Image (cartoon, rainbow, N blue to C red):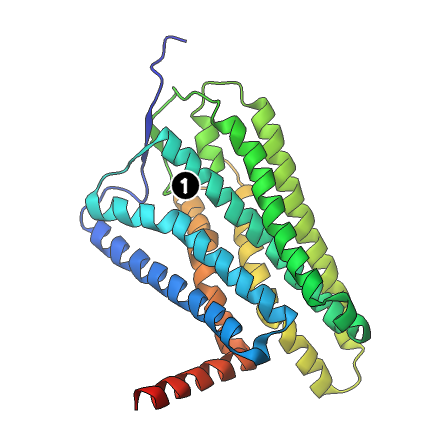
Amino acid sequence: RNQTVIMEFILLGFGNSPDLQPLLFLVFLVIYLGTVAGNLLIIALVVADRHLHTPMYFFLGNLSCVETCYSSVILPRLLASLLTGDRTISVQGCLVQLYFFGIMATAENLMLFVMSYDRFLAICHPLRYAALMNGRVCGQLVAAAWGIAVLLCTIVDSSFFQLTFCHSEEIDHFFCDLSPVIKLSCSDTRMLQAMAFAVASITLGACLLIVGSYVCILSTILQIPSTAGRQKAFSTCSSHLIMVAVFYGTLIAVYVFPTASTSKVLSKISSVCYTVLTPLINPVIYSLRNKEISESLRKALQKLACFRN
């Protein structure tokens, strides 16, 4: 009780080596610009090309929106810290970052589940797909994903703003993550940890549902008699499957199976994978592995070239 209440934190980031900071700034700046440009490009293509006005690309456009916001919650603050050397962040600013990070992470988790449900209906119930996944249902699914994410994170983070912090000023991370912030509190956090565990259980439940849907999808694909038919069916969900594997693989490595022997450097690298690299590889994967996106991009570049000429 006699400890001084902390009013700001220090994000230790990736160390304080003077020679490393400019290189890290350049790397993360290129990643951020590439992430924003790539995801905004996908959103523009989905909106402008009428051939992409289908449920699958509607969900892809919303996922790209989530990824853009996801990166913007973390990377601008990190870039400012690397550029100026100022690693301090107010307690309120840290909790606000944690709040929006939670919303984007939960929204991405639910959006991946919605996309897997869409592919499940398209491959396992193709005759009923148009009726089951119409425009109204698509809008409701996206609205539900955002609404649930905002509601859950508001409930959890409202408890964060009631905490006091007095153990230490230093957060050995490059952004305000849940576990490091809780460890610095000198308040009773048992109720908060229980609520966070409940939200994490929902995330794990969505992951299990995605796995179950892909088991059904793969089972249906293997029953297709022709090789060309199997390849066409699998190509429609392979990009999403890669995204799911990367996102949940790194997420589980950081939050589900952490051990005392896991180094903090390795934990930070895993965090970089799901917070920084996943939003970047989303447009790359869908551009390289999706013929319709590639064709739409080619047509857009041709129109742009003709307009300039």
Q: Is residue 269 left or right of residue 286?
A: left
Residue 259 placed where, x, y %? 52, 38
Look at 31% across and 62% down and name the residue there: 30
The front one of 54 and 94 is: 54
Mark 1 Cα within 10 Å, few/some/many (few <14, many 20+)? few
Viewer-nearest residue: 17 or 298: 298
**Residue 33 spot, x, y in % from top left:** 34, 62
Quarter occupied by the C terminus:
bottom left
Who is closer to the viewer here, 254 or 262? 254
Q: Quadrant of residue 139?
A: bottom right
Q: To which quarter of the image does residue 130 belong?
A: bottom right
Q: Quadrant of the N terminus?
A: top left
- Residue located farthest toward the left when viewing the structure as drawn: 18
The amino acid type of the residue labelled 1 equals Lys
| Residue for point 46% across, 80% down | 297
**Residue 253 seen by the camera:** no
Q: Position of residue 75 (x, y in %)?
A: 36, 51
Helix, strand or loop at label 1? It is helix
